Amino acid sequence: MTRRIAATISLLVFAMCLLCGVAAQNSFQEILVRALEAMFASLLIALIIGAMAQKMLDENLAQIAKKAEISEAKPKTADR
């Protein structure tokens, strides 16, 4: 999931850079080089952020599961 989101973000950045380069009337080579640089940079950043978010989510879910196990393991006392 993380890789798909990162790839989608980087392709959107690439397309945006192409459109902005054409609007600015830059040369084809300059547009392509800048768009590719932006695409790879955004891919790297999105992968790092996605990996951090996935790890945080996994840790929180493990903590919740551990709390659920502890609460199930406690014996219930009868009310008198």
Image (cartoon, helix red, strand yellow):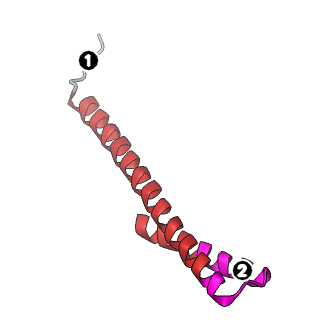
Q: Residue at x 60, y 77 (%)?
A: 35
Near-viewer residue (46 or 57) = 46
For label 2, the crowd category at 10 Å Cα-Cα, with few meaning under 14, some 14 to 19 and many 20 or more, is some
In this rendering, the answer to whether 60 lies above or below 26 is above
Q: Secondary structure at mark 2?
A: helix
Which residues, given as a range, are shown in magenta? Answer: 12-32
Q: Quadrant of residue 30?
A: bottom right
For this view, does 28 lie left or right of residue 47? right
Q: Mark 1 and mark 2: span between their CA atoms? A: 73 Å
Counting residues from the N terminus, which is met first, the one under dot 1 or under dot 2? Answer: 2
Q: Is residue 18 visible?
A: yes
In this rendering, the answer to whether 77 lies above or below 13 is above
Q: Is residue 1 visible?
A: no
Labelled pair 1, 2 in contact (Cβ < 8 Å): no
Which residue is disc 1 drawn over?
78
Q: Quadrant of residue 38?
A: bottom right
For this view, does 26 lie left or right of residue 60? right
Is 69 within the magenta?
no
Is 13 within the magenta?
yes
For this view, does 58 lie left or right of residue 49? left
Which residue is disc 2 drawn over?
21
Q: Quadrant of residue 68?
A: top left
Q: Quadrant of the N terminus?
A: bottom left
Q: Quadrant of the C terminus?
A: top left
Q: Secondary structure at mark 1?
A: loop
